[in-house]
Image (spheres, coloured by chain):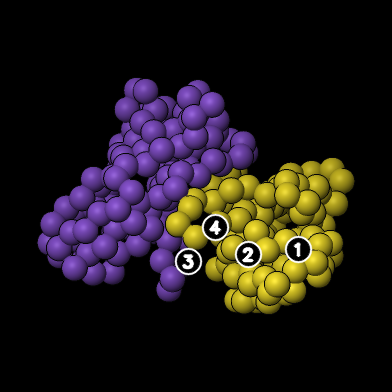
Chain colours: A purple, B yellow
Amino acid sequence: KAGVTQTPRYLIKTRGQQVTLSCSPISGHRSVSWYQQTPGQGLQFLFEYFSETQRNKGNFPGRFSGRQFSNSRSEMNVSTLELGDSALYLCASSLGGADEQFFGPGTRLTVL
Amino acid sequence: AQSVTQPDIHITVSEGASLELRCNYSYGATPYLFWYVQSPGQGLQLLLKYFSGDTLVQGIKGFEAEFKRSQSSFNLRKPSVHWSDAAEYFCAVAGSGGSYIPTFGRGTSLIVHP
């Protein structure tokens, strides 16, 4: 069974631009969660989507948004990029509920 | 609110030595507890999880963890460390307010000396 895939793996943007990251979950998984990982703040939860609906949301500004498609693939968008948005963005999928989350390799975003 | 503390930022052990990584959580009821490992440039991989039942949990790669409610701890152990175990280890807790979204600790970086 293929794992969680994230594209692109690396991205360089400049301040003020916007970016879209993509996540393809494991086949059959309907829950997709996004996390931001930085050396300073560690792993922080952004949001979770289940069956195309945002089910949980972390404490991030509105510049961070996401969506999920009918095939469970998910995208995350960050608008008006700031230097502090430089991070590893991780996507995780699961069947939902208390089921184990499977993580993708992440997208490394660098904002210059 | 749920929270996790991993008191050790770095731990250095010699190959073949035993290992214990500490994790303390804050949570009102019976938590869901996890240990994940992250190798450089990779995502997180689940080592083991505790939901209920036997408080000693066996995981992959020879790891185990023990849930101690009285101490609010879920320490990770391995009897003999291999050089390939060098990585970042994260403890996580979930279940607060009916949410299964895990809250992660800051991680412990394991360094293995030959």
Q: Label 1 lies in what chain?
A: B
The answer to whether A14 is drawn above or below residue A5 in the figure is below
Q: Position of residue A107 (x, y in %)?
A: 35, 51
Same-chain check, marks 1 and 4 = yes
Query: Distance between the Cα atoms at labels 2 and 4?
Result: 8 Å
Query: Closer to the N terminus: mark 1 or mark 4?
Result: 4
Circle 1: element type: loop
The answer to whether residue B42 shows anywhere in this view is yes
Which is in the foreground here, disc 2 or disc 3? 2
Q: Position of residue B92 (x, y in %)?
A: 62, 57
**Residue tagged 3:** A42
For residue A52, what is the image quadrant?
top left
**Residue tagged 4:** B39
A86 vs B68, left or right, is: left
Q: What amino acid is found at the position of numbered circle 1 in the picture?
A: Val
Circles 4 and 3: CB atoms closer than 8 Å: no
Q: What amino acid is found at the position of numbered circle 3 in the picture?
A: Gly
